[in-house]
Amino acid sequence: MHRRKAARHATAQTAIEYMVTYSWMFVILVIVISVLYEYGVIGGATSTGNICVPAAGFSCSTPTLNSSGTLMTAMSQQNTLPMYITGTACNTNSSTPSTFLTTAGSATLLYPGHAAVQYLFDCPVQGTAIGVPFRGNLWFEFNNGPGTGTSISKVATVQTEISSSEDLYQALSYVVYNPTCLSNTGDIVTYTQSTTLTCDILAYDININTGVALTTEGHSLIAYNSIDGSGNIYTNNVPLDLNGYGVGGYGLYLQASTISLHGLVSTAGGTGMPGSGYSPCEGGGGGGGAGAVLAVFQSSYFISSFNISGGANAVYTPASTSTQCGLGGSNTLASGGTGPCVVSRGGSGTTPSPPSLTSSLIQGWYNSGMINYLSGASGGNGFPSTSYPNSYGGSGGGQGSTYTGENCYAGGVGGSGQVITYKYTTAPVSLTPP
C-alpha cells in the first residue's frame, strides 16, 4: 500500500517537473502559430470567399484582388467630418503603415453618408496565381480639410483571393479628361486638347497642358486643391450685339488652394459695331471693356501673363456737327461712358471699383452668377446716323479709353480689365459634394 502511494507521488512529481520544464515551449509554440496566422501563412489566409469587414464608422464592398496585389473595394463613411483621402495602404499585421499609395481612388473626397466610391490598395500578396489567398488590413491617410493635420486610420479587414490579372488602375479611372462641365470635387481634371466650357468646373485638381486652349465663356474654374497648367485660357466675349454696342469680355473666376498658370490668360473686350449711315462705319460703337480675373486662393497664386486689353473701336470716318448723342454701355460693377452730344469721339468708360472682398460677398456673387460681376462693360452705342457724314461714336466699355486719331469720332477703345486677388482662410465658394 505504501509502495503504491509512493509510486503515484513520484509520477505526479514527474508530471509537474515536465510541465515546469517544457511549458515555455508550449507558450512559444502558441505565439508562433498566432504570428503565422496573422501573416496569413496558415489558416488565416485560407479563403472562405471574398469578405470585407469595415471598421466602426465605415462600410466596404466585396473586394477584388489581382495578381499584382492591387485590391479594389468601394468605401463610404458615416463619421462627422468629410475625409480628404491623401493615401491608401494595405498590410498583413496591425502595425500602422509607413508608406501610402497616393491618389488611389475615384474620389479623394469622402463625405459622411454619401455614396460609396472605389479605392485601390497595394497589398503584399504571396504569389501571383489565381486562387492565392490573402488576408490583411486596409488603411486611409487623410485630413478633414484645409488647415487640419494628417491622420491615419484602419478602415477595414479583408479576406479574399487573387481572382484576375486585370489592370485595376485602368479599370478605375478617376482622372477626367477634357470635360466641358463637371461637379465632383474628388476628380482630377486634365485638359489635353482645346475645349470650350458649357458650365463651371468643380474638381479636386485642374490641369491645363501646354498648347491647350481652354475657353471658359464666363464659367468658373474651382478646385479643392490646385489649378495648374501651361496652356492658354481665353474667356471669349459676350454675344455680339447687333445694335451698335461693343461687346465686353467675359470675366474669369479662379478658386483653389494654389493657383499656378504659366500660359496666357485673356479677357480682351470686343470691337464695337459700325453705325448705320451711308458709310458702313458711321456712328461706330465703342469697344467693350475686358473682363476682370478674380483669383481666390489659400496658399499661393501665380499667373504669368495676361492679355486683358479692351476691344477696339469700330472703323471711323470724318464727321460734321450734330446734337445727336451716343449711348453708354454698362455691366454690374462699371458702366461705359456716354458718347458726347457734340462733334467728338465717345467718352471713356467707368473704371470698375470692386468693394472690399469677403468670403460671404464672393459667395453671393457666385450664387447670383459670377459672370454678372466680372465681365467687362459693353461699349457705348454710337448714334446711328442716317445722313452722311454724321458718325458720332459711343463710349468705350468699362475702363474704356478714347481713340486719339484725328477726325475720328467713332466709339472709344474699351480699356483693360483688372486682376483681383483674395486670400481666404475659409473657402468663399462652397464646394458641392460629389
Image (cartoon, rainbow, N blue to C red):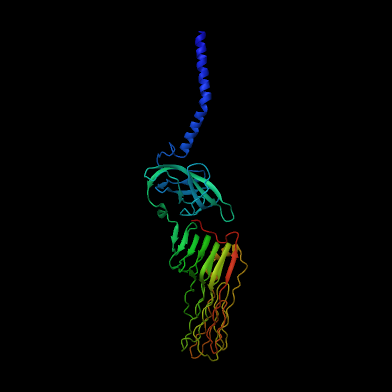
Q: Is residue 150 above or below residue 283?
A: above
Depth order, front residue of 323/329? 329
Residue 373 visible in the snapshot:
no
Could you tell me which residue is drawn at 42 percent across and 53 percent down?
A: 169
Q: Residue furthest right?
A: 356
Residue 101 position within the rendered picture, expressed as x and y whole percent measured from the top left = 48, 51
Q: Is residue 415 above or below residue 222?
A: below
Q: Residue furthest front?
A: 21
Q: Is residue 162 left or right of residue 14?
A: left
Q: Is residue 149 above or below residue 30?
A: below
Depth order, front residue of 340/202? 202
Residue 143 position within the rendered picture, expressed as x and y whole percent measured from the top left = 55, 52
Residue 34 visible in the snapshot:
yes
Could you tell me which residue is drawn at 47 percent across and 74 percent down?
A: 239
Q: How many numbered dots are placed on residues in this image?
A: 0
Residue 16 position within the rendered picture, expressed as x and y whole percent measured from the top left = 52, 21
Residue 122 position within the rendered picture, expressed as x and y whole percent measured from the top left = 45, 49
User: In which image quadrant can residue 363 be found?
Assistant: bottom right
